[in-house]
Image (tube, helix red, strand yellow):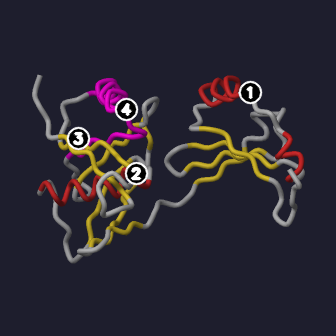
Amino acid sequence: MKTLPFKQVDAFTARPFMGNPVAVILGGEELDAATMQRITRWTNLSEATFVLPSKAADYRLRIFSPTMELPFAGHPTLGSAHAVIESGFAAPKNGILRQECGAGIVELSISEEEILMKAPEVKVADVRGKLPFARKLLRLSVGPTWITGEVESAAALAALKPDMAALAQFSIDYEATGVTLFAPSGDSSSA
């Protein structure tokens, strides 16, 4: 098997072991998705990325969590940009680095102190018709897909006792990263 350069990058910090780590594999255009997924699980991190050549941008990024490929994710994008520049895989042009990912082209502003990005547009889809048991349920996609639901009050939200195994299965069934609930603003709970 061919060896590939591998970096573990701490995003959101300039201090080692104080950030949000991501595994970055430079190259790998010969790897299939199943192999990328297996490598991601092996890293034992929340995400791993694979930096590949692109015809539309400075590089293409495939982002994997331990269970699925993601079209976009924040800290993997930032950490991978750092690895791309540090390794010489690609260089910014006029302070801009362009990354192609499943969500489209992401522009990153590069300076000596930081890497900033403009995230892709959030895609919102109302899935109440598909999930009749869940009133006011929305499916949001900004890379990872979260199922978000409104609960009538903060007190009702605080009183919930979620079945975590059932939520995990629900997430798998609906190909979601997870489930999050909220109560209307201005409402408070004594719990």
At label 2, which amino acid type do we have?
Asn
Among the two numbered marks 2 and 4 on one chain, the one whose residue lies closer to the N terminus: 2
Among the two numbered marks 4 and 3 on one chain, the one whose residue lies closer to the N terminus: 3
Q: Residues within 10 Å of mark 4 (few under 14, many from 20)?
A: few
Q: Which residues are magenta?
A: 32-52
At label 3, which amino acid type do we have?
Ile
In terms of secondary structure, where does tag 2 sit?
A: strand
State how far apart marks 2 and 4 are (Cα).
13 Å
Among the two numbered marks 3 and 2 on one chain, the one whose residue lies closer to the N terminus: 2
In terms of secondary structure, where does tag 3 sit?
A: strand
At label 1, which amino acid type do we have?
Asp
Q: Residues within 10 Å of mark 3 (few under 14, many from 20)?
A: many
Question: Horizontal and vertical percent for residue 148?
Answer: 70, 46
Residue under pointer 4: 44
Q: Give the residue drawn at x 11%, y 31%.
A: 3
State how far apart marks 2 and 1 are (Cα).
28 Å
In the image: residue 135, left or right of residue 93: right
Q: Give the residue drawn at x 59%, y 53%.
A: 123
The label shown at residue 25 is 3
At label 4, which amino acid type do we have?
Asn
Q: Give the residue drawn at x 63%, y 31%.
A: 171
In the image: residue 90, left or right of residue 121: left
